[in-house]
Image: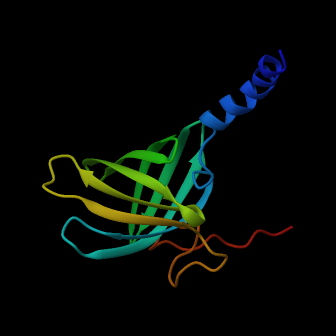
Amino acid sequence: MKRLFLAALLAPTLLWAATAPAAAQRSGVYEVTGRNLDGSEYRGLLELRQVGLTSFHLVWNIGRETIEGVGMVSGRTFATAFTAGNMTGMGIYELRDGDVMEGSWTLMGAQGNGSETLRPATETPPPGITPGVTPGTQAPAPSRP
């Protein structure tokens, strides 16, 4: 009887833990480092915004390019779909220690994969990157009381 009661008491907690997004897949800004399909390297920022229990809206700012997409978390896996110009792409990431996500991505019809690492942004972004500002545009004016 005690075991049945204990199982009933723990069931909601275990169910929540099984469906809750992994810790690194939470809303916020992530520093991006990656390698393109041609092998060249890139850096930028990713804004990750949770819009459902396991779904996310994504905005990458890489160089002068802004790429929008969606993502879904399942356990320690984070899958993405995005458009880059007129190309459709997809990626898959694995949650690592320290809230880091590592994965690979490709574009439809490409003959290879790119790779990418996402780390929670530090308080001081890398040189030339301003969170919330698309590279190549002006930073927003300070708000006045």
Q: Is residue 29 left or right of residue 33?
A: right
Provide residue 8's location: percent of width, then percent of height. Answer: 77, 20
> As drawn, which residue projects farthest toward the top?
1
In the rendered view, would you say 12 is above or below 57?
A: above
Quadrant of the snapshot with the C terminus: bottom right
Q: Quadrant of residue 97?
A: bottom right
In the rendered view, would you say 21 is above or below 104?
A: above
Provide residue 18's location: percent of width, then percent of height. Answer: 61, 35
Provide residue 67's location: percent of width, then percent of height. Answer: 40, 56
> As drawn, which residue projects farthest toward the bottom?
127
Provide residue 12's location: percent of width, then percent of height. Answer: 74, 26
Residue 80 seen in this snapshot: yes
Q: Quadrant of residue 28?
A: bottom right
Q: Is residue 23 left or right of residue 103?
A: right
Q: How many marks?
A: 0
Residue drawn at 32 percent across, 64 percent down: 115
Q: Is residue 52 left or right of residue 101?
A: right
Residue 132 seen in this snapshot: no
Give the colour scheme of this rendering: rainbow
Quadrant of the snapshot with the N terminus: top right
Q: Quadrant of residue 52?
A: top right
Q: Foreground residue, 57 or 5?
A: 5
In the rendered view, would you say 113 is above or below 127?
A: above
Residue drawn at 32 percent across, 57 percent down: 104
Q: Is residue 104 left or right of residue 133?
A: left
Q: Foreground residue, 85 or 125?
A: 125
